[in-house]
Image: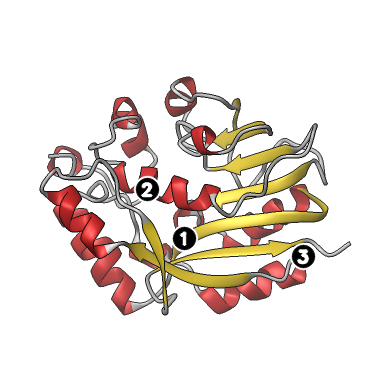
Amino acid sequence: MAGRAHDDLEPNDPELYERLADQWWRPDGPFVMLHWLAAARARLVPQARPGAVLVDLGCGAGLLAPHVRGYRHIGVDLSETSLRLARGIDPVCADVLDVPLADGCADVVVAGEILEHVHDLPRAVAEACRLLKPGGLLVLDTLADTALCRLVAVGIAERVGLAPRGVHDPALLVDRRALVRECAGHGVRLELRGIRPAVFDLLAWSVRRRPSVRMVPTATTAVLFQGTGRKIG
């Protein structure tokens, strides 16, 4: 249902988020997998120290916020409608390629499920790293530029309702080597690990026996992967 109603849009059209904005907080809605990923992402974020700042790039309606406490949580997103629905963040309506925040302002920068939507990966990485304080932590998750990912995360996931139809443009999936190289060029040594939905959780969720699905580590980064790294200095 979430797909066919938006077949007039090109893949990766930001208008999709405006049309589906009222669905952000539905645990069984078109953004369901983003809820699962937000919980997994939060496990990589350290406990906040007093006064710590977290910048959440591509925050949508703030799905990460319930899982991380104690930070001044700044959420950056292009969708004003999504930001109006956000909970627990200080919203900033802006492009992740040009963030209106000071250099070195953040203890943690999170880029969750956003890099596969940008048209300029080097610039997005440069902005994320620019915002980090020396010693600050970059946390991300995204989709790999592989045939397997195009089949699983675009072809299958969008057809079975784990993501809205047309939300991804396969041409923008992320080259893992390029991502690691770009981060290194800005002083962040990024380490990657693959993740996937827990199979039994997913089966139970599909028959309404579980309200959510845990994301668990997997041996390959060829579909969905997380990355973490600290800024040298």
Please name whichever residue, 123 or 135, is drawn nearer the observer in this view of the structure. 135
The image position of residue 52, as x and y in percent, is: 76, 37
Q: What's the residue at 35%, 65% (across, down)?
A: 196
User: Hey, what amino acid is under mark 1?
Assistant: Thr
Left or right position of 112 against 99:
left
The image position of residue 162, as x and y in percent, is: 24, 51
Residues at marks 3 and 1, CA–CA distance in whole angstroms: 19 Å
- Whichever of labels 2 and 1 marks the residue nearer the N terminus, that label is 2
Tag in front: 2 or 3 = 2
Q: What's the residue at 47%, 20% (across, down)?
A: 84
Residues at marks 2 and 1, CA–CA distance in whole angstroms: 13 Å
The image position of residue 86, as x and y in percent, is: 48, 25
Q: Which residue is mark 3?
A: 186
- Quadrant where the C terminus sits is bottom right
Q: What's the residue at 73%, 72% (across, down)?
A: 184
Please name whichever residue, 100 or 9, is drawn nearer the observer in this view of the structure. 100
Q: Secondary structure at mark 2?
A: helix
- Compared to residue 11, the image places residue 1 above or below, namely above
Residues at marks 2 and 3, CA–CA distance in whole angstroms: 30 Å
Q: Which residue is mark 2?
A: 36
- Whichever of labels 2 and 3 marks the residue nearer the N terminus, that label is 2
Q: Which residue is mark 1?
A: 142
